[in-house]
Each structure stands twice: as C-alpha cells, then as structure tokens.
Amino acid sequence: MSSIIGREEEISILKRLLSSKNSELLAIYGRRRVGKTYLIKTYYKDQLTFFCSGQYQGKTKDQLINFAKQLGVYFPESKPVIPPDTWQQAFSLLEGCLNNFDAAGSKKVLFFDELPWLDSHKSGFLSAFSYFWNMYVEKRNDLVVVICGSAASWIIGKVLNNRGGLHNRVTQKIRLLPFTLGETEIYLSARNIKPERYQLLQLYMTLGGIPQYLNAIERGKSVAQNIDKICFSKDGALVNEFENLYEALFNHPEKHIQIIKGLAQKNKGLTRTELLKTSKLLTGGGVTIAISELVESGFITKVYPFGAQEKNALYRLTDEFSLFYLKFMQHKTGTGKQNWTHVNTLPSYTSWTGYAFENICFKHIEQIKKGLQIAGIHSSFYSWQKTGSDEEKGAQIDLLIDRADNCITVCEMKFSIDKFTISKKYAEEIKNKIQSFRTQLKSRKALLLTMVTTCGVTNNDYKVQLLDNELTMDVLFD
C-alpha cells in the first residue's frame, strides 16, 4: 500500500518545506513503529537524495561503514567510497557528493533515521552534524534535512533543546502520534479489512493505532482470531514486543518499565506520590526524567487537576498494548488456555475494558468536542478528585472539559456490549460527584453531564433526570 493514510497536518508541513526558499531542518519523533520512516520515505520519494539509518547498538565504526555504503547507493556515479574514520570526514564526503549532484534548483531531501543510534558513545556525531548544518547546509537554499528518532527524549534533549551548535537550528518539528480510531478504520479498510466498529474498538484497545501492529492483522480472520494469533500464539508478532519496545527506546529502561507496571496495577490515574509508592521507586534517581520521557513518548498521559496544584496531576497508562500485555499476556501459562476467548471470561476483563475505553476517550477529546458541537470553542481538559473521610464520601471525575462559553462538560465514559443502563446506585454516585464538584467550584459555570458509551444509554427516568448529552463510540471515529 503506497498511499499515506491520515497524517493531513504532517503532510501540509512536509509540503511547505519543499516550497521554502531556505534550507530546512525537520526533526520528526514518535514511538517505535508509529510510521515515521514510512511517512518521510513515501512523501519525499521523488526528492530523497540521501538516506542513512542508525544501527541499533552499533559501534561508531559500524555506523561509519553503513554511512559509506549509503553514499555508494545514492551517489553511484562517485568513485567507490572508503569508510571514513570520523563523522567529520563522513560529512565532508557527503558534501562532495552533493556538490557534484546534478539537480540544481530543486529541493533535495537528506534523511537521517534513528539519529540516537548514529550518535553512539563518544562518536562525535552530533558535533560533526551541527558543523555540517551550520557551515554547509544553511548556506544553501535547496536542502531539506530530516532527522528522526524513536527516542523522543533524546531528540528533545539533544536536538530541540541543544545549547551548542544546533541551538535554535531546527526549523520544524513533528511529533508523530499513533493513528486515531478513524484513521485505523480507514487504514484497515484500504486492506479490505472491515470489522464492525464494536469489534474494531476492542482491537484498538488491544493494539492501539500503531501501523506496524495493524499490519499483522489478517483479512478473513475475526478480531478474536487475530488477537489470538498476534498476542498469544507461540510465534505471534507481539509476543516479545513489550521487552523489545522499551529496550529500543530508552537507555537503562528499568525505571521506565517499573513506572509502566505501577500504573497498570490501578485502573485509574495515579498522582506522582501514589505512582512512586505503587512502583516501589524512590524520589530522585532519574525517576523524574523517566516519567517525562514516557509522557513525551506517548506511553503515559499527564492529566492536570482542575483548580488544584500540579503535584496532584494524574498519570495514566495510555499505551494500549502495554496495558493489555501487563493485564493478560505477561503471565501466559503456556497451556493454550490463555487466548482472547479465555480473556473474556476473566474478572479483570471488565475493569480493563472500562479503563482502556476511558483512555481512548482521552486520546479522542477533539472528536468528543466535535460530537458535542463545541469544536470551535476554546477549552481545556482536566481531572478532579476529592479525598473521602469518615464523614463524607470521596469522589472522582476522570474527564472535565472546561469551556470558554461559561460551561463545564462533565464526562462519564462507559464500555458495554449493549446499551448502558443507569441504575439507582450509579445515579446516586453521579449526583454525589457533581454535587461535590459544585461545592468546590469557585464559579457559576453551568455543569453539563455527558455520557460517552459504546452503544448509547437506555431510556429510563435516571437518564432523563441526569443527562444533558450522550455520545456513542461512532463520534470517536470522526
């Protein structure tokens, strides 16, 4: 499949860089297997003049040999390239090839993939690259240099926040996110795979919108069969993905994995204090950096508290595959019983679907706003919680949309196979939440209760009394 699905904002950026009258430095980053390389190589296929990718755990010598080989591939008219001894020599060779390249006037794209791997220990890569940009590329007006990496924290720390030769040199950045539900539906449909939306929602809750994961889905198999094959079979595409994922993204990923596992233990967001306690981690020791890296890489989401200090912000594990793996895959017994059909019978299944559906709603807030017809109204989203006491019940609202039109949308999110029914007990819980929140609210903003469910809400007196709006899963696909 050669076409690009979705990525409309990113494509507009890539198009604009080609029409620029100056040389451009684009930094694109995002988690492993999200489609960064595919996007650049596909969109810039006619302008790609040089491509080089870092080798995982490769030594400097190996990286330089690979670089020389790529010079031979993209500039075959040049004399055979002897592998350089340093990155300074390597970029000098590239300059010579570009000077002799006959494509005057048109934009030429130089693509350096997996940049963190190219910058091996004491290699001098970043220093040589910044010199190459400052002394050669910037003096021309016909080059687009693209640097890419899965280690988002490295790209941000070493490039975007660089205080040396690359300081303020990046002219454009793209943080490539996984497909939305709607993009996932289009992507699978392009392969003639068209599951019913409830089934597709379950698939997304398991794999997320990672193109490489979605490529493992086979036409002609049900969602249950595909999940069994991908996640639970002996040679499944994602059986060993969890360990490989964090090893490839982070140096010394032990703390990152502890944080992820800590968040997976609770089907709700955790404050930093709660997270450290659950993960059995001590303050300091790189924990702050690890949390920041996981947030920037898209594995966890930081939800700010409404009207409270940032220290009360909640962290949620929103990487679908990591959550599914830790809930159901890591303790696979090998007896053959652990498959999707078996997972459906486990007590933890219901709590997982509820939390996973909430996470999807957090990732599709723009779609929810569109469904509520408030897309054009400025708004921010928050969480809110009140600690209980002997005299008073605690309360928590996972998603609040604070709007500039003097309203606050209170979102309740529920996953169910059929229409969701508001019971007397649940109605009392909702009333308690809203009343507790109203008591602490220091404004007269209107509170509007919205339920986001898979199949809608059953008509009864509680629905009539409580609900201002209801949305089904269909709005998440817009």
Image (cartoon, helix red, strand yellow):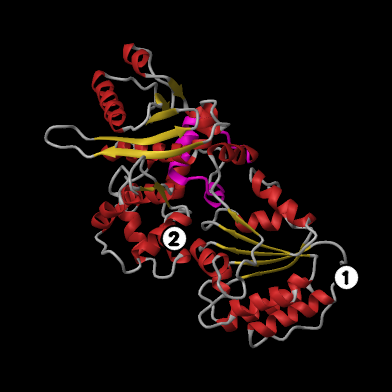
Q: Which residues are magenta?
A: 191-215
| Residue 102, label in figure | 1
Q: Establish if 216 lies above or below 374.
A: below
Which quadrant of the structure image shows residue 452? top left
Q: Nearer the viewer, residue 205 or 412?
A: 412
Q: Establish if 261 lies above or below 287.
A: above
| Residue 293, label in figure | 2
Q: As shown in the figure, which amino acid type bears the numbered disc 2?
A: Glu
Residue 411 locus on image (x, y percent): 40, 30
Residue 12 locus on image (x, y percent): 70, 48
Q: Residue at x 74, y 72 (%)?
A: 137
For the view shown, which residue lies furthest in the bottom direction? 85
Would residue 2 be found to the left or right of residue 472 on screen? right
Indicate yes or no whether the magenta region holds residue 283. no
Q: Residue at x 55, y 37 (%)?
A: 220
Residue 308 locus on image (x, y percent): 33, 44
**Element under disc 2:** helix
Q: Residue at x 39, y 21 (%)?
A: 419
Give the Cα distance between marks 2 and 1.
Answer: 42 Å
Would residue 447 be found to the left or right of residue 131 on screen? left
For the view shown, which residue lies furthest in the top direction? 461
